[in-house]
Amino acid sequence: DQQVKQNSPSLSVQEGRISILNCDYTNSMFDYFLWYKKYPAEGPTFLISISSIKDKNEDGRFTVFLNKSAKHLSLHIVPSQPGDSAVYFCAASAMNYGGSQGNLIFGKGTKLSVKP
Amino acid sequence: EAGVAQSPRYKIIEKRQSVAFWCNPISGHATLYWYQQILGQGPKLLIQFQNNGVVDDSQLPKDRFSAERLKGVDSTLKIQPAKLEDSAVYLCASSSRRLANEQFFGPGTRLTVL
């Protein structure tokens, strides 16, 4: 059973417009969420994260929104650029009993294509 | 700062053969992870090391997979014998104590089992 779901396998957006990538989770114990970006033949690269005590985190063109009641988060990219074309993975983790952060659970990814 | 290094980048073997992957994490990173990423899926954790000790290997198929990190730095992941369903990209990642959530990934090793 998938605990982290990215229901859109792909998304196509025009350059300069907003890209919105969505992610849903089922485990209410998750308290830390991350987005990774992956280019072909490379490993995932950390993009942005958010703790469950926040509902928004912004870093330049990238903003992550967290809706805990809906168990939903989204990544907004504004404005989108052709270089943003990649696979985006949503990941989540929960605090262990020992107080350390648990392992990352990844979604299946969404392939973003930004067209010039 | 050098990133996570992995070798080989590609490997093709016959089923029932053995294969080993090597990972060198970012200098000073105490935690090292091995992930398996099957085509169309997200990375799935196989094993996590803290220094040279295993923290979590609950999803490692121990009848055929093994991993070690003897000196708390480099790590090797071995599959013996390989099955067709082991075809995947094997990713190594590392993280520091201070930013344990932010894992830095290597380029991965693409394994094809024929």
Image (spheres, helix red, strand yellow):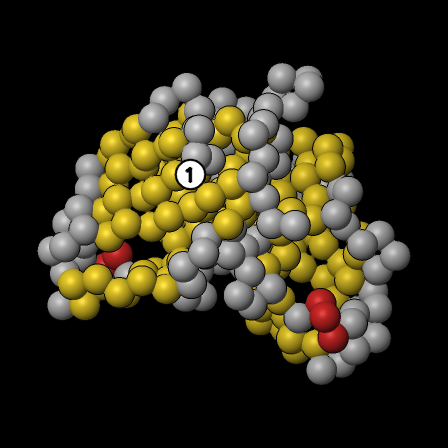
Q: For mark 1, name the chain.
A: A
Left or right position of B31 against A21: right
Q: Is residue A3 visible?
A: yes
- In the image, what residue occupies the spot 40% across and 43% down? A35
Which residue corresponds to the image point at 32% horizontal and 43% vertical from the top-left? A75
Q: Is residue A53 above or below residue B11?
A: above
Task: Tell me the residue at 26%/65% (across/down).
Answer: A12
Q: State the image coordinates of residue A81 (x, y, percent, origin top left).
A: 18, 57
Q: Secondary structure at mark 1?
A: strand
Against A25, residue B53 (above or below) is above
Q: Nearer the viewer, residue A106 or A38?
A: A106
| Tally of marks | 1
User: Callout 1, which amino acid?
Assistant: His
Residue, disc 1: A72
Residue B100 shown left or right of residue A81 in the figure: right
Front-most of A4 and B14? A4
Which corner quadrant holds the C terminus of chain A? bottom left
Q: Residues within 10 Å of mark 1 (few under 14, many from 20)?
A: some
Q: Position of residue B72 (x, y in %)?
A: 68, 35
Q: Position of residue A44 (x, y in %)?
A: 45, 52
